[in-house]
Amino acid sequence: MATIDFPAEIKGLRSTLESIESVSDPSALEAKIAELSEQAAAPDLWDDQENAQRVTSALSHAQDELDRVKKFSSRIDDVETLVELGHEMDDADSLAEAETEVAALRKELDSLEVRTLLSGEYDAREAVVTIRAGAGGVDAADFAEMLMRMYLRWAERHGYPAKVMDTSYAEEAGLKSATFEVNTPYAFGHLSVEAGTHRLVRISPFDNQGRRQTSFAAVEVIPLIEQTDHIEIDENELKIDVFRSSGPGGQSVNTTDSAVRMTHIPTGTVVSMQNEKSQIQNRAAALRVMQSRLLLIRQQEEAAKKKELAGDIKASWGDQMRSYVLHPYQMVKDLRTEHESGNTQNVFDGAIDDFIEAGIRWRRNQADD
């Protein structure tokens, strides 16, 4: 016998889908697909490879989003039919199958509903993520590398293209810092809730006495710049240094000065790039990330001014936003949302969607308070 109220559950699914459609706007998506399809069909599209990739990626994403919304409506209809047949035939197997499908639909719709909460100015952008080792010595450097792997595995699970732009290796193990892009729409909206200080507690594999060690790493997430943003940078305000790329342990992987370190003198913002093949490519990549960081600085300054005018004195996110405890027990816990998981290995393997979704809902609630 079924253990759920099918009419109420199906009504709830339809209500959730309606709220998603009101934000997603299938008609607007269809118009966007038509426009992008026209651009993609242009014979000179690939004369500008960067723009071509942007157009084809946006077209694929818009089509996937439209298909996803339409398929949900069909799936809800199908499960409703299955329930009716199950009751008519007194078929327990059909009702059990319907119950499983209702649970799957609820989980998938809840995840899709989170997308409707991403309405920030830059939420739809691709993301640039930088991870830096903090306090904790070699354990912190190792933790930074663990976090980079976690996010790259998360992207891989979803089929999102990701590109490592810069890595600075620590002497003994791990990373001093690393920068990578996640090139899919809404990457910034999702990953921006991961920004902050992450803490790891474990028995240090680098301590001969097997003592427990606490280490920290910082995660920075910024939106990827677009041509329409018009962030102008005076070349006289930039200091450009070139050097040879290097790998783990300082081993040279390039015999020319192709790596680039770019400093924006007025703000002190520094960007390093070494993973492209030429100095010209590294310089272009560094300038793009520099523009993204300056765009974020401008956004933060504008937000600070608005808070000052509104008299908002509430504390912002705390420095320590998530703890990963491997000893004396196994637990990953977000200190803002209270969401937690006892499967630490799964989390480090990229299973962080529940944390991201909880973070997005938490952020929206904070904004509404």
Image (cartoon, rainbow, N blue to C red):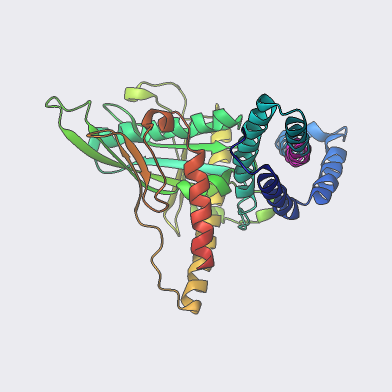
Tell me: 113 left or right of 37: left
Number of residue marks: 0
**In the rendered image, which quarter is residue 138 located in?**
top left
The segment highlighted magenta reads 62-76
- Between 362 and 245, the one nearer to me in the picture: 362
Q: Is residue 2 visible?
A: yes
Q: Residue furthest left?
A: 209
Q: Can residue 225 be seen in this view?
A: no
Q: Residue 205 appears at what percent x and percent y? A: 22, 25
- Between 294 and 107, the one nearer to me in the picture: 107
Which quadrant is home to the N terminus? top right
Q: Predominant secondary structure in magenta?
A: helix
**The stretch drawn in magenta includes residue 73:** yes
**In the rendered image, which quarter is residue 168 located in?**
top left
**The stretch drawn in magenta includes residue 317:** no
Q: Residue 200 appears at what percent x and percent y? A: 29, 39
Image point (86%, 42%), residue name: 34
Q: Residue 23 appears at what percent x and percent y? A: 72, 54
Tell me: 10 left or right of 321: right
Tell me: 112 left or right of 179: right
Q: Is residue 337 above or below residue 250?
A: below
- Between 81 and 90, the one nearer to me in the picture: 90
Image point (55%, 26%), residue name: 277
- Between 182 and 336, the one nearer to me in the picture: 336
